[in-house]
């Protein structure tokens, strides 16, 4: 009789699993522990793909990028207080980048937390999470799990996507209810990210500005690659005939060898353009807030801006033609009204493409050396060729010099193939991002990592080996942050920005059964990475780079405050 009864019952564990599965969520990025250990096990038993990490920030970074790649919320599942806080870093990162993610954390009972009676891992997690994400909810009763999960999903993916916190007290998981009643309480979210069209007047305003431009420029951001309307973006850009540049994660949305791509003439187009159209890109620090020397004469440009979030308009510069809507609906509507579109003046496009050719030609010889020790260009020149031969491979990229040089050297030819440090320019996204990229797409992943950047998530090479993922981690090992040459002026300790010289990171991968290779020349490096992609085996290539080769803070050294007292 007891068995018969249990067959008609469900509980909090299973209702959460059923609610997620009902909404098409299959992958969970997780670190097990009280009170969610059994939840992770049951998710796996119910056929979900559960990837267990070694640190919650890495699981969270995986969930964040899964959201970016799939337009479904990436799920990170953690324990209470400290595990929750580790995951929260990534939830804030997802929110800042406008990617949908849900952090589900176990928590202590309200009765104890609210009176601060001192529980195991006690913390008022909901209050802590609220200011750092797009929305935060707590579920107290099993019959509310359907509503809680539905609201979390809708909040994460609708409008400007972002991170959502879902608080799951331990006692919720074991709450019991009738199975049939439980099933009825679940919600399959209808149209979670509804289309959003700008008004016709806004469309006409933008089109007449664009049409009147003598020197139009389009800037594609990662919001445009997130929108997954790749053919439409391409059709629009081609219809305008305007030169375009791509923000780092929008590289490859149109292939980087596209005839209108002005990436190699970036300085010229930003300075000279008279009409700039932003598509899913913010005018934030990554674009120098749309002002300063880089942008030429002040008040000489018109701005057109497509963004789903009305509050983004005028954030730094007056927007002459705001287009508040989703990129697919907006560009689709614009295109319908663009028959007989004039080509931009040849004087403008000619100047841009001439400059581009000059810059490409200037860079080319630097990319073909076989120097030992390696410099950034020699090493990246080889990786550039490898990516040209493997257009489906995903590039994960973080570091300072390793980031800045790789972004300008390695071309992407397909959308959403370049995954990097995003809006914060944060270090530590590497292994979490690589793992989710492999899990969500099944394509080979090559990480180009500074040795410092790698250190923030390096332990996850065990995770990569454990799940047998096709990830090749290339460490640009210059034995330090920016450079490997700092010393302690007092002579007591190592300099603050250096690491163990020529550390053998390759042995970390071997410790867990993967391949580990040291590469001292571009030839070695090219061979090792090609082998890794061909075999699909977890591989770490320790690429020894000249410690002198880098520059302070890569390309953003200007952001460092300077001391007048203590001169370098
Ligand atoms: P980048 O760093 O590449 O410049 P940002 O992350 O700064 O890109 O900007 C992306 C922008 O795209 C955000 O302001 C976000 O609101 C917007 N966005 C995201 N998805 C969509 C969409 N489907 N339609 C319109 N705008 C979107
Ligand atoms: Mg370094």
Image (cartoon, rainbow, N blue to C red):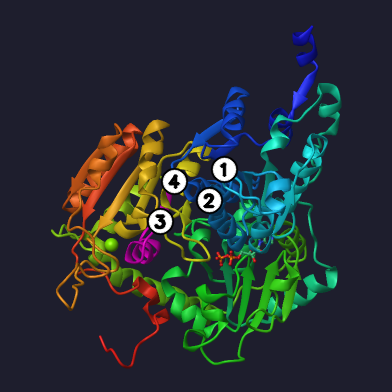
Q: How many labels does the image show?
A: 4
Residue range of the region highlighted in magenta in the rendering:
394-410
Give neighbour class at mark 1: few <14, some 14-19, many 20+ (Cα, 10 Å): many
Label 4: element kind: helix
Whether the magenta-drawn stretch holds residue 204 is answered as: no
Q: Taking 564 as reference, is 229 left or right?
A: right
Q: How far apart are marks 4 and 2 (CA)?
A: 24 Å
Say if mark 2 contacts mark 1, CB within 8 Å.
yes
Residue carrying label 1: 79
**The quarter of the displayed image where residue 427 is located:** bottom left
Alpha carbons under labels 3 and 4: distance apart: 9 Å
In the image, residue 528 sits, relative to residue 165, either above or below, namely above
Q: How far apart are marks 4 and 1 (CA)?
A: 23 Å
Ligand 2 closer than 8 Å to the CB at disc 4?
no
Q: In this view, does 125 lie to the left or right of 516?
A: right
Quadrant where the N terminus sits is top right
Q: Is disc 3 placed on a helix, strand or loop?
A: strand
User: Percent from the top left, x then y, of residue 303?
Assistant: 66, 79
Answer yes or no: do the residues labelled 4 and 1 have beta carbons within 8 Å? no
In primary-sequence order, the first of circles 3 and 4 is: 3
Q: Nearer the viewer, mark 2 or mark 3?
A: 2
Q: What residue sits right under mark 3 in the picture?
A: 397
Q: In which quarter of the image is the C terminus?
A: bottom left
Q: Mark 4 points at which residue?
A: 434
Is 407 inside the magenta-drawn segment?
A: yes
Which type of secondary structure does the marked residue at label 1 adopt?
Answer: loop
Distance of mark 2 from mark 3, alpha carbons? 28 Å
- State how far apart marks 3 and 1 are (Cα): 29 Å
């Amino acid at each position: 009789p007891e068995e018969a009864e249990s067959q008609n019952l469900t509980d909090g564990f299973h209702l959460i699993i059923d609610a997620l599965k009902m909404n098409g969520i299959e992958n969970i990025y997780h670190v097990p522990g009280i009170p969610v250990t059994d939840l992770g096990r049951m998710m796996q038993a119910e056929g979900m793909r559960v990837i267990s990490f070694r640190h919650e920030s890495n699981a969270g970074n995986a969930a964040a990028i899964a959201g970016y790649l799939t337009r479904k919320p990436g799920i990170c599942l953690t324990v209470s207080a400290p595990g929750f806080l580790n995951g929260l870093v990534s939830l804030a990162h997802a929110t800042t980048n406008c990617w949908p993610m849900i952090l589900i954390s176990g928590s202590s009972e309200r009765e104890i937390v609210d009176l601060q009676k001192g529980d195991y891992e006690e913390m008022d997690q909901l209050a802590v999470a609220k200011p750092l994400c797009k929305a935060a909810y707590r579920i107290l009763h099993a019959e509310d799990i359907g509503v809680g999960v539905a609201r979390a999903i809708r909040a994460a993916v609708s409008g400007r996507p972002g991170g959502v916190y879902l608080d799951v007290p331990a006692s919720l998981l074991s709450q019991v209810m009738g199975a049939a009643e439980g099933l009825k309480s679940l919600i399959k979210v209808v149209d979670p990210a509804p289309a959003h069209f700008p008004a016709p007047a806004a469309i006409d305003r933008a089109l007449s500005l664009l049409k009147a431009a003598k020197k139009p420029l389009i800037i594609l951001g990662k919001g445009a690659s997130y929108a997954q309307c790749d053919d439409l973006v391409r059709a629009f850009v081609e219809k305008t005939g305007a030169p375009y540049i791509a923000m780092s994660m929008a590289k490859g949305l149109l292939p980087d060898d596209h005839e209108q791509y002005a990436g190699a003439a970036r300085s010229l187009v930003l300075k000279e353009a008279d009409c700039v159209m932003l598509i899913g890109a913010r005018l934030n620090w990554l674009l120098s807030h749309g002002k300063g020397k880089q942008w030429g004469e002040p008040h000489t440009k018109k701005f057109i801006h497509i963004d789903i979030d009305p509050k983004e308009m005028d954030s730094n510069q007056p927007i002459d033609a705001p287009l508040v809507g989703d990129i697919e609906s907006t560009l689709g509507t614009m295109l319908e009204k663009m028959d007989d579109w004039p080509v931009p003046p040849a004087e403008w496009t000619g100047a841009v493409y001439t400059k581009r050719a000059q810059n490409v030609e200037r860079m080319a010889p630097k990319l073909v050396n076989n120097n030992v020790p390696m410099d950034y260009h020699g090493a990246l020149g080889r990786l550039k060729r490898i990516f040209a031969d493997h257009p489906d491979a995903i590039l994960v990229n973080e570091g300072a010099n390793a980031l800045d040089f790789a972004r300008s050297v390695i071309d992407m030819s397909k959308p959403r193939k370049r995954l990097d440090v995003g809006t914060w320019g944060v270090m530590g996204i590497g292994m979490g991002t690589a793992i989710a990229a492999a899990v969500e797409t099944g394509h080979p992943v090559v990480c180009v990592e500074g040795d410092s950047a790698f250190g923030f998530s390096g332990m996850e090479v065990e995770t990569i080996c454990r799940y047998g993922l096709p990830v090749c981690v290339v460490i640009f090992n210059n034995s330090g942050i920016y450079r490997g040459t700092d010393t302690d002026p007092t002579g007591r300790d190592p300099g603050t920005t250096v690491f163990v010289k020529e550390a053998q990171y390759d042995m970390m991968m071997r410790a867990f059964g993967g391949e580990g290779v040291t590469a001292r020349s571009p030839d070695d490096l090219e061979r090792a990475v090609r082998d890794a992609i061909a075999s699909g085996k977890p591989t770490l290539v320790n690429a020894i780079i000249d410690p002198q080769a880098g520059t302070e803070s890569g390309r953003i050294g200007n952001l460092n405050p300077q001391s007048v007292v203590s001169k370098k």
